[in-house]
Image (spheres, helix red, strand yellow):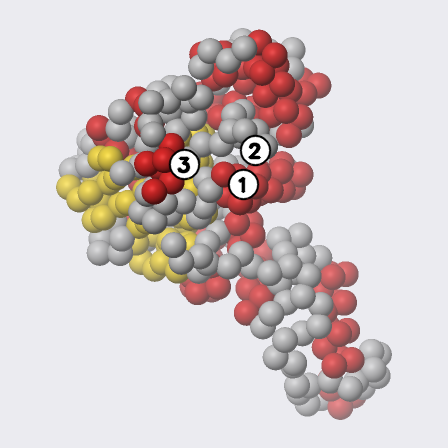
């Protein structure tokens, strides 16, 4: 599979059969057990992992908790020691090529899936091998490279790129067929896709995930340590603990407050994120790009709603009196992504 698979334009899979099956999970993981060569065992346990069409599911957990191992099983790269893993309705390790062609994947190390000698050659690999006409290949390659900010680097040698550029190139190559109304994979599997991306790259990927979900009903499952983006994209979050056991599953607002300190690079990051989750629970999500100015605007609205003019809280406030906080603060700038029930 070479780390990258995507939708075939000439698949023998019956499209009507797929549409009739949208109420069934695209991915099912039930008590997966995996044994490494050193004897270490990963076991997901009694909480069943499911991903339905149009959903984005996020796996979070500390290093060594089995996130990448689960994705490898979903992609059919490993055979379970026990339990069940089904992808697109079939046992994942027996997935036929015509179904495998409906999956787009980005592995944790982008170098493992960079194929072409130049940036354009690499992104053209899939559409060329699917037999698309030259004009369509050129259009898809340009669209994907522009989406990830690599069009100007199209003629550069792949391995001369920076780590962040190679990460973006891996995404551009895997998602090259995600093109407006025409194309879109049934399942996208992303292992730490936000790693080494700058804020613009993270927003580009976030917007693309939401677009694929809304436009094509694409199911997305990803792992990440960058929790700040999770509320913007996730319908459901699975928290993994040591040994791969799924400790908790549910909407972001239910799971993220229980994430321990490993989910953040610093204590201040954890504090800001906790504040965002608390505000979102009260109806005012500031989004992943929260800053002091926007937060100050929310606080000002609270003050006005409480009948206290900004700048007029005096010694009595500082002495410890409490100001009532409205149940739903004024500026609801963006909502956490709602959890869908298939």
Q: Is residue 141 above or below residue 224?
A: above
Q: Is residue 335 visible?
A: yes
Residue ID for mark 2: 181
Between label 3 and label 2, give the one nearer the viewer: 2
Give how far apart the Cα atoms at labels 1 and 2 are.
Answer: 7 Å
Is residue 268 visible in the rendered structure shown here?
no
x, y percent for residue 48: 27, 53
Q: Earlier in the sequence, mark 1 or mark 2?
A: 2
Q: Secondary structure at mark 1?
A: helix
Tell me if mark 3 has few (under 14), some (14-19) or many (20+) residues whose alpha carbon lies within 10 angstroms of its own: many
Pointers 1 and 2 in contact (C-beta within 8 Å): yes
The N terminus, quarter of image: top left
Horizontal side of 43 relative to 231 (left or right) equals left
> Residue 27, image x and y in percent?
32, 42
Q: Which residue is mark 1?
A: 215
Marks 3 and 2, Cα distance to the nearest angstrom?
A: 16 Å
Q: Nearer the viewer, residue 54 or 198?
A: 54
At horizontal 52% and vertical 25% (from top left) the residue drawn is 177
Residue 331 figure quarter: bottom right
- From the image, tell me which residue sits under label 3: 187
Residue 261 is left or right of residue 288, and the answer is left
């Amino acid at each position: 599979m070479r780390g990258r698979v995507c939708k075939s334009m000439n698949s023998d899979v019956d499209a009507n059969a797929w549409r009739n099956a949208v109420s069934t999970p695209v991915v099912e993981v039930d008590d997966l057990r995996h044994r490494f060569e050193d004897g270490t065992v990963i076991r997901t346990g009694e909480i069943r992992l499911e991903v339905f069409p149009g959903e984005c599911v996020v796996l979070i957990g500390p290093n060594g908790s089995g996130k990448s191992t689960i994705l490898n099983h979903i992609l059919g790269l490993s055979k379970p020691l026990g339990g069940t893993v089904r992808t697109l309705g079939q046992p994942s390790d027996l997935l036929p090529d015509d179904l495998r062609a409906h999956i787009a994947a980005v592995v944790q190390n982008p170098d493992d899936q960079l194929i072409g000698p130049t940036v354009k050659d690499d992104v053209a690999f899939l559409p060329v091998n699917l037999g698309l006409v030259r004009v369509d290949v050129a259009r898809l390659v340009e669209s994907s490279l522009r989406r990830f900010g690599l069009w100007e680097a199209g003629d550069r040698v792949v391995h001369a790129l920076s780590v962040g550029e190679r990460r973006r190139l891996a995404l551009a190559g895997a998602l090259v067929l995600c093109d407006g109304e025409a194309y879109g994979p049934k399942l996208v599997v992303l292992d730490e896709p936000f790693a080494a991306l700058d804020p613009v790259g993270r927003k580009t990927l976030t917007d693309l995930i939401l677009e694929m979900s809304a436009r094509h009903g694409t199911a997305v499952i990803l792992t990440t340590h960058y929790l700040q983006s999770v509320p913007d994209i996730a319908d459901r979050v699975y928290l993994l603990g040591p040994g791969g056991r799924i400790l908790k599953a549910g909407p972001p607002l239910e799971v993220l407050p229980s994430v321990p300190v490993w989910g953040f690079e610093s204590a201040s990051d954890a504090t800001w994120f906790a504040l965002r989750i608390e505000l979102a629970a009260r109806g005012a999500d500031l989004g992943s790009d929260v800053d002091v100015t926007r937060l100050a605007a929310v606080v000002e609205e609270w003050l006005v709603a409480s009948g206290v003019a900004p700048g007029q809280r005096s010694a009595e406030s500082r002495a410890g009196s409490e100001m009532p906080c409205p149940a739903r603060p004024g500026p609801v700038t963006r909502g956490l992504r709602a959890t869908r029930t298939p």
